[in-house]
Image (cartoon, rainbow, N blue to C red):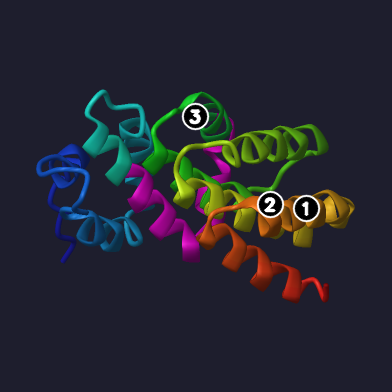
Amino acid sequence: MNFMMKPVRIHDYLAGGDRRSIGRADELAGLLAHRPALLPELVQEMWSDDLVVAMRAADVLEKVTRTQQQELQRFKKELLGLAEETRQQELRWHLAAMLPRLELSPSERQRATTILTHYLEDKSSIVKTFALQALFDLSVLYPPLRTQVEELLRAAMRGGTPAMRARSRKLLGKMGK
């Protein structure tokens, strides 16, 4: 027997509470892992005027695409655009985690690198640390970025926050430096 799936209102899973909680994000991520047809609605919520909804939508998309990276590809244009325009730190750190998961053309790779390098100037240490990780991840996928990323990691070792210094140390170790 073919049972109809219960309708899902993405917004209802994301709304409520404040920025210090994830609400029902983990529950929604589990659901969307099995219902990828709902991902466009989730991605749209990342532009919500409600900062809690936007933040949680980015969190859910990042979680789902840890194991389903191919699902992210169809939103590449939107994600690069949002990464460029958003000033919300929670969106930035989730987008930084997702950008290296995209299959990028040379011009898109340059755009992503520019965005992430700009994130190193963010006031949030978390955003800066996620940007360093994302730049490193890109350099693994695209070796010509390695020299530039190594310089950024060394600069973060000298003048970054404690979290940036620790992450840079770890990443330079992976580079054999």
- Judge from the rendering whether residue 175 lies leftward or rightward of residue 34; answer left or right: right
How far apart are labels 2 and 3 at the CA level? 18 Å
- 166 lies above or below 149: below
Residue pointed to by mark 1: 149
* Quarter of the image where one finds residue 11: top left
How far apart are labels 1 and 2 at the CA level? 6 Å
| Residue at position x 67%, y 70% in the image | 169
Q: Position of residue 104 (x, y in %)?
A: 72, 43
**CB under 8 Å between callouts 1 and 2?**
yes
Q: Residue furthest front?
A: 159
**Circle number at residue 19:** none
- Helix, strand or loop at label 3? It is helix
| Residue at position x 61%, y 58% in the image | 133
Q: Position of residue 27 (x, y in %)?
A: 20, 61
Front position in the image: 75 or 113: 113
- Magenta: main secondary structure equals helix
How many numbered marks have been drawn onto this rendered protein structure?
A: 3
Mark 1 residue type: Val
Mark 3 residue type: Leu
- Within 10 Å of disc 3 (Cα), the crowding (few <14, some 14-19, many 20+) is some
- 117 lies above or below 2: above
| Residue at position x 54%, y 48% in the image | 128
**Circle number at residue 82:** 3
Q: Is residue 53 magenta?
A: no
Mark 2 residue type: Leu
Q: Position of residue 57 (x, y in %)?
A: 31, 43
Residue extent of the magenta highlight: 57-77
First in sequence: mark 1 vs mark 2: 2
Q: Disc 3 or disc 1, which is closer to the eye? A: 1
Quarter of the image containing the C terminus?
Answer: bottom right
* Quarter of the image where one finds residue 48: top left
Residue pointed to by mark 2: 135
